[in-house]
Image (cartoon, rainbow, N blue to C red):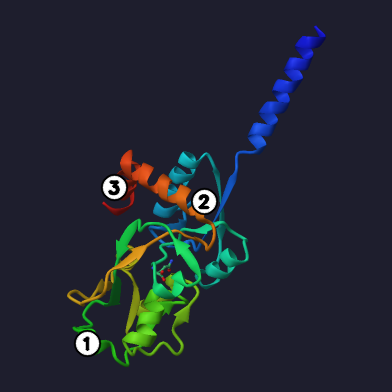
Amino acid sequence: MKKFFAIVISLVFCLCACAASAETLTVGLNAEFAPFEYVDDNGEIAGFDVDLINAMAEKMGMEVEIEDMYFDGLLGALSSDMVDCLITGMTITEERQEQVDFTEPYFSATQAVVVLKGNDSIKTLEDLQGKKAAVQDGTTGHFMAADDLGCDVSDTVYKFSSDAALDVVNGRADCMIIDDAVAQNFLKLYDELTIVEGLDMPVEEYGIAVNKGQDELLASLNDALAAVIEDGTYDELIAKYFQ
Ligand code: GLN
């Protein structure tokens, strides 16, 4: 009988230890970037990136914990180890690669120029020179508008992409420059908005960012990404969010 109890007690111990060691993957994102990450009607953080990282974490035997923060604070949160990785529609750029490592790309995008319907003042990239462009702080759209396209962003840089969209709706800015899939989403919300067609924007690739030196985590994220592509989960998520 004593032996039986000893076995039961050690089993319970083992189960507790195992449950406690289900490792947590802490993920930083900015839930202002639908359909990649947003707060849904129930107040939950949802979206393509959220489903993708959950499916990947399952392959890795890890639990996901999400930290929602401003986009321009995400890289700092990563470098100070507040989070383990970032999945937030983040474009892989050379500047960011000096600071962090990225997984293999998981999505392709371009910047879209969003204007009020009937505004035909922008037909080429050159036409954007001097135009008032609303952007989200610290994004590739922000840098492109300010540094490459010569837009005026002096008082139209926002923490939230939804505020940038409102500037165009209200006629406070000539345009918003933001990733195409997110721009499409704003068109669904605001009937008066449209996207300028035929602009020759470079292709951007989204990656999941980890701190440099985290080679094991990077490798297991890449393996998990390959696994969810291989088993069809990735395509299911594309269908769920983009069709
Ligand atoms: N893809 C853009 C970037 O990396 C925008 C990302 C975002 O706003 N979440 O800067």
Mark 1 residue element: loop
Sequence-first disc among 3 and 1 = 1
Q: CA distance from mark 2 to mark 3?
A: 31 Å
Label annotation for residue 41: none
Do the residues bearing badges 2 and 3 touch, measured as CB atoms within 8 Å? no
The image shows residue 95 at horizontal and vertical percentages of: 44, 75
Viewer-side label of 2, 3: 2
Residue lying farthest to the right in this orientation: 2
Q: CA distance from mark 2 to mark 1?
A: 50 Å
Label annotation for residue 121: 1
The image shows residue 217 at horizontal and vertical percentages of: 51, 51
Look at 51% across and 50% down and name the residue there. Answer: 42
The image shows residue 112 at horizontal and vertical percentages of: 29, 73
Above or below residue 189? Residue 22 is above
Look at 29% across and 47% down and name the residue there. Answer: 239
In the image, ligand 1 is in what quadrant? bottom left
